[in-house]
């Protein structure tokens, strides 16, 4: 059986030298802004701060899938995972995260899920 569309786009973002990587409020606000920008529906959220000066891990469970983040402020690094299906627009979510966290450099990988021809996008 063939399907005309991939179930969704999966974006992996590596962020370098951004702001708020040690601040759970900044991280949660960035992910919620990303979900709004993408037109996604938040079902639940969970965030954990590993202590003063340490990183944050968080996830938004979406009706359209999820957005997650893990930060390492001591390395100036954050890993973001955006997977969305349906009408949600993951590229808008990625842009909202960039706007909120203002990284000096971003590497983005795009994978079309559920499709036999996976498409990768080079770093930008």
Image (spheres, rainbow, N blue to C red):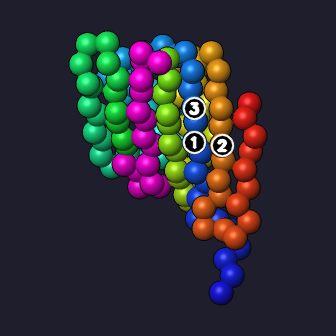
Q: Main secondary structure of the magenta part?
A: strand
- In the structure shown, which secondary structural element does the residue marked by tag 2 occupy? strand
- In the structure shown, which secondary structural element does the residue marked by tag 1 occupy? strand
Among the 4 quarters of the image, the one containing residue 31: top left
- Name the residue located 30 percent from the left edge and 41 percent from the top edge: 45
Instruction: Tell me the residue that label 3 is attached to.
Output: 14
Q: Is residue 47 above or below residue 17?
A: below
Q: Earlier in the sequence, mark 2 or mark 1?
A: 1
What residue occupies the far bottom of the structure in this picture?
1
Q: Is residue 63 above or below residue 21?
A: below
Marks 3/2: CA distance?
Answer: 9 Å
Write down the region rendered in magenta.
61-75
Among the 4 quarters of the image, the one containing residue 2: bottom right
Q: Is residue 48 visible?
A: yes
Instruction: Tell me the residue that label 1 is attached to.
Output: 12
Q: Is residue 48 above or below residue 89?
A: above
Q: Is residue 100 visible?
A: no
**Tags 3 and 1 touching, CB below 8 Å:** yes
Q: Is residue 51 above or below residue 124?
A: above
- Name the residue located 49 percent from the left edge and 17 percent from the top edge: 76
**Tags 3 and 2 touching, CB below 8 Å:** no
- In the structure shown, which secondary structural element does the residue marked by tag 3 occupy? strand
- Name the residue located 48 percent from the left edge and 27 percent from the top edge: 78
Mark 3 crowdedness (10 Å alpha carbons): few <14, some 14-19, many ≥20? some
Q: Earlier in the sequence, mark 3 or mark 2?
A: 3
């Amino acid at each position: 059986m063939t399907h005309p569309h991939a179930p969704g786009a999966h974006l992996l973002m590596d962020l370098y030298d951004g702001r708020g990587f040690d601040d759970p409020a900044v991280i949660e606000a960035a992910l919620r802004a990303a979900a709004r920008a993408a037109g996604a529906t938040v079902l639940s959220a969970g965030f954990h701060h590993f202590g003063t000066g340490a990183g944050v891990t968080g996830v938004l469970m979406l009706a359209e899938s999820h957005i997650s983040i893990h930060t390492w402020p001591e390395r100036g690094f954050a890993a973001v995972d955006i997977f969305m299906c349906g009408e949600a627009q993951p590229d808008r979510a990625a842009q909202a995260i960039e706007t909120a966290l203002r990284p000096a450099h971003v590497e983005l990988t795009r994978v079309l899920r559920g499709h036999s021809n996976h498409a990768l996008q080079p770093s930008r």
